[in-house]
Image (tube, rainbow, N blue to C red):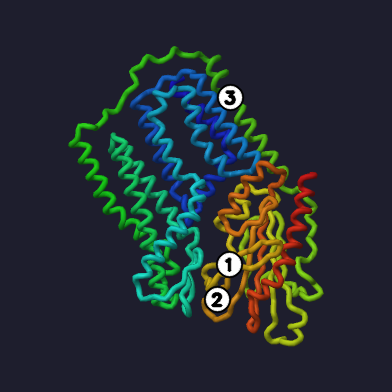
Amino acid sequence: MNGALPLGVVAILALALWPALHVLGARWLKFDESYSHGFLVLVVSGFLCVQKWFVRRPVVGVYPWWLIPLALAALGYLAGSLLLIEALQQIAIIPLLIGALLLIWGWRQTSAFFLPIGLLLFTLPVWDYLSWSLQLITVAVNQFLLSFLDIEFVVEGIFVFFPGVGAFEIAHGCSGLRYLLVGLTLCTLYGELNYRTVRSRALLIAAGIGLALAANWIRVVVIIYIGYESNMTSSLIDEHDFFGWWVFAGTLVPLFFFARALENRERNSNDTVADRVDTRKQTDHPGWPGVVGGVVVPLLLLAAGSWYLELRNHSAVMTADGRQPAPLVDTSRWMPVFQSNLKGWSPSIQRPDRSHVNVYRDRALAAEMPESPVEVLVGLYTYDFQRPNAEVVQYRNRLYPGGALIPEKSFDVDAGSGLTLKGMTLRYRQSEERLHIVYGYYVEGRWETNELLAKLAQLPGIFNARSDASLVIVGVSCSRCDGPSVLEELLPDVRARAQAYLDQLADQLEQK
């Protein structure tokens, strides 16, 4: 039983958590994101756990007091399933695994496995919530470094503008999150294998964090400078990911020397702590009735609740009648042209439950200036409820293709009712043609203006019946007009019509 029961516990947990694990594995397979190291860390974590097990040979018992934290972790996971908050499910995975082991091994035996299992923390996508703060820090550092160079630039939010040249967006991929997570993983693993004191581990992790962030700052400032000097034509701009890993590898050299110095310091000091072995007398074998009642039944109840909510969520995907909304513009002025893109541009939004994208032309100006008409794209992308791989804010949802369009400047647009949304001017790389776009997120009855706030807007949904999320975006193309002024005139009406439609749709969903 000492070997079979832990394997059985892990198997039942894998069954119970499979919906979340499946999503997590799919995220690890996206090699251009921040969590592509996930499977490698899983293998390393499993190897360390097996190694610990052979050294310590923990004896199975039943420790019923640990049912309380296990139940709290299970409630957190089920709440994430019920409220469709993927981050809450992912956060609960590690506490559930450790809680289940505490239930059969107790604290003294399980504590040796905390760190090997805890390595998986650096593979959970919950770290995405740090991305916006890291982007702002990267912008501030690069603004400071660029000030020492003979370059004219303007910083607005996460954009660095070079008059007459172009602009760089310090986007999610430029936040340095991927280097931070890999650095944390390497430092934690090195400390587990080579150190005995908390002080040495903490110093190494602190150094790893600093060098990982520095690698990203160096990468970004070099790319910006090369882009400026080459007038945005350098191949380094398109190969920035590959270049970034070379810079990160370079920062590992001083980190390794620092790690070796800490290791030598421990070896020569008297504060090294011997690896403790639990010599306390183990509890008597609980027998199969105690194991089934105290361990297996609670885990099976978790599995039943998890799959019930998963099947319930899947059955609720198609819940509304799917009718098209009324036009989001005044059709007496704006004439539909039956296109789904504006000069080759349209947002790339993954798996919305419904999308409405139309292009319109100004009727009056079309007659006056047929050679240069004013055209607008109005897009509405809606998720009836957010769920894994179907969220209004996710890595692969793009407002514009970064390879073809360059942001030149940002501006604010009055959307009516005291709401201000963000807009930007985009220029095609190979021409002087420009687009002007404005966008906003309508999440569970709240308007938000950036991705982080739109993501966090899911949390108040715990206290209301809504779970919908939408992106409203308007773009204008014209060669002889003031694009931001056109958006300023058009947006209040589009926003009001879209909001009325979405509120009515939410009422339909609630009644189903």
Q: What secondary structure is marked by label 3? A: helix
Identify which residue is drawn at 68% across, 75% down: 486
The mark found on residue 298 in the picture is: 3
Q: Residues within 10 Å of mark 2 (few under 14, many from 20)?
A: some
Give the alpha-carbon distance from disc 3 to disc 2, as whole Å. 58 Å
Residue 434, percent from left and from top: 59, 77
Front residue of 132/180: it is 132
Give the alpha-carbon distance from disc 3 to disc 1, as whole Å. 48 Å
Amino acid type of the residue tagged 2 in the rendering? Tyr
Labels 1 & 2 near each other (Cβ < 8 A): no
Residue 271, percent from left and from top: 23, 32
Task: From this view, report whether residue 424 is shown above or below residue 90.
Answer: below
Task: From this view, report whether residue 406 is shown above or below residue 100.
Answer: below
Amino acid type of the residue tagged 3 in the rendering? Pro
Q: Earlier in the sequence, mark 3 or mark 1?
A: 3
Identify which residue is drawn at 34% across, 49% down: 208
| Left or right of residue 467: residue 66 | left
Amino acid type of the residue tagged 1 in the rendering? Tyr
Labels 3 & 1 near each other (Cβ < 8 A): no
Q: Earlier in the sequence, mark 3 or mark 2?
A: 3
Count of picture labels: 3
What quarter of the picture does the C terminus occupy?
top right
| Left or right of residue 186: residue 384 | right
Q: Which residue is mark 1?
A: 400
Q: Which residue is mark 2?
A: 428
Q: What secondary structure is marked by label 1? A: loop
Identify which residue is drawn at 45% across, 75% down: 232
Residue 283, percent from left and from top: 43, 14
